Image: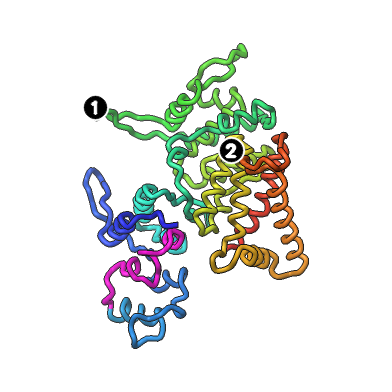
Amino acid sequence: MNSISEITKRDILDLFKFGLDITILWETEKVQYNYFGRLEEIEFLKRLYDLKRMQSLDSRYHNAQDDIWKHTVNNEDYPFCWVFEDERFHLKNGSDETYLKFICEIFHPTVRDEKGYWKEFLDEVNNLLQNDGYDIYPADRISNRNVYSWRIFDSAENKLFIPFSLRNQKAIKEKRMQLSIKLSTRNQIYQLLEKHNDVYQKTDETGWNYNVTTSDEVFNDIRQFYTPKCYNKQRQYVETDSLQDFVCSSSPYCVIDAVEFFEKYNLNTEFETKVNAILKLNEIPLKLNNGKVESSFNIQIQDSTLAPIQEAGLKELLQEAANYYDEGNLKIAVEKLWDAFERLKTYYSPTLDKKKSASKIIGDMSGQKAHYIELFEKEFHELTQIGNNFRIRHHETTKTDIEDYRHYDYFYKRCLSLISVSVQYLY
């Protein structure tokens, strides 16, 4: 795909070339950040490109590595940020996927300068990319530091965060999801939230500064969706603004809402780890993952599943499938997932035709071992047959109808299991 405009690429180039204006103590200051972070420029580029196999633009040298060393280290006569406009690297006129992979590498924990303004530059780059339909997001962690990947930007989804109780409202009502949280566990959760119940200043429209707590902000967020209530001593369900009462004496689904909203305001990277430790210790089958609590029993498309995918169309279909599944729309979720499965089989097109492309994926998954080749070939074939025989695509009228939502759930989870493994072998 080629959705990133020339304007966006120019603005990102200017950002790294000329710096970013930020406000420090009521004054505007221009700050700089090298795209190659704490590495040497050649060292950074070698993480993405085989420089010794790329052509030199200087006839005196046999490859790009020697050429670049001469002009960036020895002579220093290449202009700053030259790589963004060098045709060999396909950043100016190449695919979105190539460009986004390069941008994500800039903010990799091994590359970025933790003492520099990398976060401010990441936020500004993200703002620019979102105009063209992409989002840089934390997909994984290394040594407790975020590793970033890219995804299709869903502006509607990002405008309003839907809390756990409402995301799962249909499943709760149909009793497909049941949750119980003991009082001792609720107390552990409350103590953790209270520990992270920070006080900070806000400014109103008149310029007046006032103090607010994290719990104040959380309750304001919750009120956008429902009135926060708890059981009082008379066992009446009454409105509350007490964090302790809300966590210890309300619906268990509301407790999880509070956890998610606290995560939204929390800057401590250990918060997620601590929440998950409490959930695991108390055998609650839930997990906090990048701001959302999910069932640890449910198979779902994780950020780490999307991260290796360098083809925007496939990534978009998987994101759509996950969103529809979370909303409880299993019919459309399965349709999108099967579209993704068919697109996965063409991942290496047009270099390889569809059959050879699928064979390459199977070969990589199996390590060329006969028993695993047979296993994965059979699974690819059977999922293809399911797509051909059942009315997964709803405009097809000659297929077997799927009338039980539990069958949709089975199809979804079976197909996703194969896709989740397959994408780990894409490169």
Residue occupied by mark 2: 326
Residue type, label 1:
Thr
Label disc, if present, on residue 206 of the rendered structure: 1
Judged from the image, the secondary structure of the residue bearing numbered disc 2 is helix
Residue nearer the viewer, 328 or 296: 328
Q: Residue at 59% of width from left, 45% of height from top?
A: 336
Q: Quadrant of the C terminus?
A: bottom right
Label 1 – label 2 distance at C-alpha:
41 Å
Percent x, y for residue 101?
Answer: 45, 61
Left or right relative to 305: residue 221: left
Q: Which residue occupies the foreground of this view, 296 or 1?
A: 1
Q: x, y percentage for residue 162?
A: 51, 33
State the residue in front, 412 or 307.
412
As drawn, the residue found furthest toward the bottom would be: 60
- Give the quarter of the figure containing the N terminus: bottom left
Q: Is residue 45 above or below residue 150?
A: below
Can residue 148 be spotted in the picture?
Answer: yes
Q: Position of residue 56 (x, y in %)?
A: 37, 81
